[in-house]
Image (cartoon, rainbow, N blue to C red):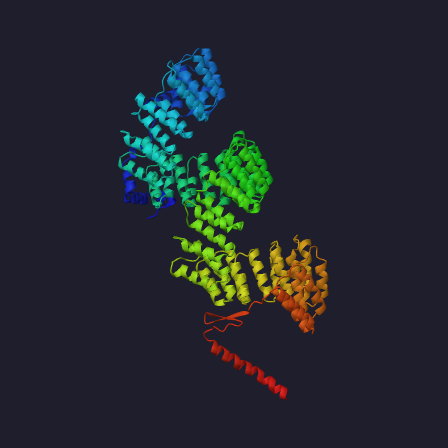
Amino acid sequence: MILHSHFIVNSKFSIRRSFEAHPILNILKSSITTLLLHTDNGEDINAHKMFDKMQEPNLKSWNAKIRECCLNNHYKEALSLYRQMQQAGLRPDDYGLPALLKSCAALSTIELGRALHGSVVKEGYESDKSITKALMNLYAKCGALYDSQQLIDEMGMRDPVLWNILMSGFSASKFYLEVTELFYSMHVCEEEPKPNSISIAIVLPVCAQLRALKSGKSIHGYVIKSGLESETLVGNALLSMYAKCGSVWEDSYCLFSQIDTKDVISWNAMIAGYIENGLFLEAFRLFCQMLLAGVGPNCATIATILPVCAFLADWYHGKEIHCYVLRFGLETDVSVCNALMTFYSRIGYMKEAEFIFRNMNSRDLVSWNTVIVGYAMNGLLSNALELFHELLSTGLKPDSITLISLLPVCAQLHNLQEGKKIHEYVLGNFRLCKDTAVGNALVSFYAKCGKLEDASRTFEMIRKRDLISWNTMIAAYAESGQGGKLVESLCDMNNQGIRPDSVTILNVLRVCSFFGVKGVKEAHGYSIRAGLISELTVGNAMIDTYAKCGRLDYALRTFENLPGKNMITGNAMISGYMKHGCEEGAEMIFNQMGERDLTTWNLMVQVYSQSNYIDRALSLFCKLQYQEGMRPDAVSIMSVLPVCAHLASLHLLRQCHGYSIRACFDDVCLEGAMLDVYSKCGSINEAYKLFRTSPRKDLVMFTAMIGGYAMNGMGKEALEVFSKMLELEMKPDHVIMMAILSACSHAGLVDEGWAHFNSMEEIHGIKPTMEHYSCMVDLLARAGRLKDAFSFITNMPFEANANVWGTLLGACKKHHEVELGRLVANRLFDVGGGDIGNYVVLSNIYAAGGRWDGVGEVRRLMKMKEFQKSAGCSWIEVERRRHAFVVGDSSHPQRLIIYSMLRTLDRQIREPIMLLNQC
């Protein structure tokens, strides 16, 4: 029974049943006592009641009340009582001052703390140890580390507590090196006190932050020599340090096994260590061992293990823990609720996460960030923005995590305005301005929105650029194709002593194809020297880039020398061969691969399809289904569609279309491709039906439909579709304008063709290319306006190519324009028209005009150039079988029946003609 959170909340009976049904919950049930909330001691409660009953509280009662508030963590109330006390003309004594200083430290009100320090000096309490420690704690927690250090130097005390407070302050302010120096001073100086268990617990997390495993082991040696290894606090700190330094198996687990009395913190440290090293299953198993050992999990345990349950095969464990949380009232703990929301967000249950969020009694910033990240992670981008605005309305200030989570959302929505507002907020916050991660997120945001100059300016403003900063900027240049800027950034990065990593190399390879094979070789050489080539992502990208540069020999050599190969490596090699039409090489790699995925098969179908090996493509497509048991995806269908077009097989196309519908492929590109093939197969009605029923019509769909009408001579219908597209405010591109001009040409719509040609630059801002001019020549030539076409070509803004002249030459043949045809042919041969078809057309023009000398001259040129006309070929599909016929080939198995039928047809055709001649 899967229990959703809203169902669990509303049904105690269901909770009880699910609780009894699962072993984890039964174990958790036995440890209920460890999770009960503890009340304040009776003396404090009595003091509170007595103070309320007193009509005129005296100095002692004021101090007692302040101390009670501080002990109960009611720091604001303690400071409020201090102000009332001042108004009553009383001053706190040595009993109340430590509590007030602690309240100032908790609320970071350092100015009031300094004022209290003045009172301490005036009243002569500076020699009081408890007050001194409270002052040290105040300055340390408020980041006034210079004041803390000055205070300890002035007092000259040898109390280890003061040193620990100072080290804790430096650690909280992330001055990790100073912490290690203070610890070393305590250790080596004979006059100073030696580090105790608390000192060890402070310095070991610093070693973990610095990943200083060697220093941590040295401190471990000191712990053993000092006899502190038996203390649970020290053991837990060592556990955490080893785990965070990556030595979870070698040292952390070994130490954990040796701890005689493992408390809940010991288990928590070990579980957290596994999680930090990505060992999620081991962490959950250890959690189960903890329950079996009778150790009751606390809120920290639940908050640590819950998010991990999202990575396990069975998500139900997380829901079981949710039942436990509700059973024992732990949903009041903010950290537990945050962990629950993280779990549900990771498994895509955002309704449950939002339900928990809305029912929280109190929320911290982590709660808001968790749901915002969940929305962004699950594609609910607008919800993430709305929740962010709701966060701002509460008065809470977003932190770096909020902004780093939200900026990619703005980039995906292309919401430049919202992203700029976030940037303004960052500029107004000194701490966020110094945050490198926020700067990196802003650079990435501007780059993805196409604002490269803003990205560059933001990059320059980052104070401490790390490798991610440089990679983000390099990726932006790579995305926009600015190879020169990318190289400059790479040089600057190198000059600043930052070494490129695999991400840098991958971004560099994206633009290497523009610089040629030399750039790829340089990137390849660096990758080998830096040891990055062993990473499969780099090796695969290197193969792909070499192939794009046309150097399949280098790609193959890289492929053969890679230390480890996977399916992606083989696919990259096949893709390279496919791009260069080398089916033999692709076939060789395909046969060598021991493991193949659907991408591999799709690539090979494409290889055979584009190389006109139609039978092999179809055979492979059938094999991947029936022998390999794979289900074709949208790419598979896209790969086989060219085969349908090549065969003009409407039956095969309908099969592909039917499969796509049954498989629920929601792919606009696939629909556009099928529409195009329907048109090429002559079934324009089915093409239009597909176009009409498509819920999402993009530019590709409109282009395919207009192109289909064009090739079937339906110019007016094509223009109607184009008008509908313009009504939808879709901007045409070069390709669709080509389709429109072609439609006008095939339908003889000269005036409409001229109008659309002129509108390209004037209305749509599209500069005509050679292909557009060729379409206009074809339009004029088909209409018989050959002289206008010739004049149009000579007035083109650039030199006409062979295609343009060849179009006009074909029209000269059709309209028997011998002299113009000869002139056009000369121009065609001058620009390098080496197509044998052009010579044949010119020969036919001469023959039609009785210019046999011209025919002989053309034949002589063809012989001299060693041109050979390709044999004609045609085919027909009968009962799902294709029959091909090539000129001069008599290998068809049914050739005798075919030739007999042809002779009969020929005789039947000739008989009426003979009778007509006799009459």
Could one spot residue 435 in this view of the protein?
yes
Q: Residue furthest bottom?
A: 919
Image check: 741 left or right of 331?
Answer: right
| Residue under the point 35% across and 34% down | 248
Quadrant position of residue 35: top left
Could one spot residue 58 in this view of the protein?
no
Q: Position of residue 424 (x, y in %)?
A: 57, 35
Q: Residue furthest front?
A: 864
Looking at this view, is 836 or 202 the one in front? 836
Quadrant (top left/top right/bottom left/bottom right) for the C terminus: bottom right
Image check: 49 left or right of 505?
Answer: left
Q: Is residue 638 above or below residue 810?
A: above
Q: Position of residue 431 (x, y in %)?
A: 52, 30
Q: Position of residue 436 (x, y in %)?
A: 51, 33
Looking at this view, is 906 or 182 the one in front? 906
Q: Is residue 796 above or below residue 846?
A: above
| Residue under the point 41% across and 54% down | 592
The total number of labels drawn is 0
| Residue under the point 37% across and 30% down | 241
Q: Position of residue 390 (x, y in %)?
A: 50, 39
Quadrant position of residue 159: top left
Image check: 615 left or right of 495?
Answer: left
| Residue under the point 38% across and 29% down | 213
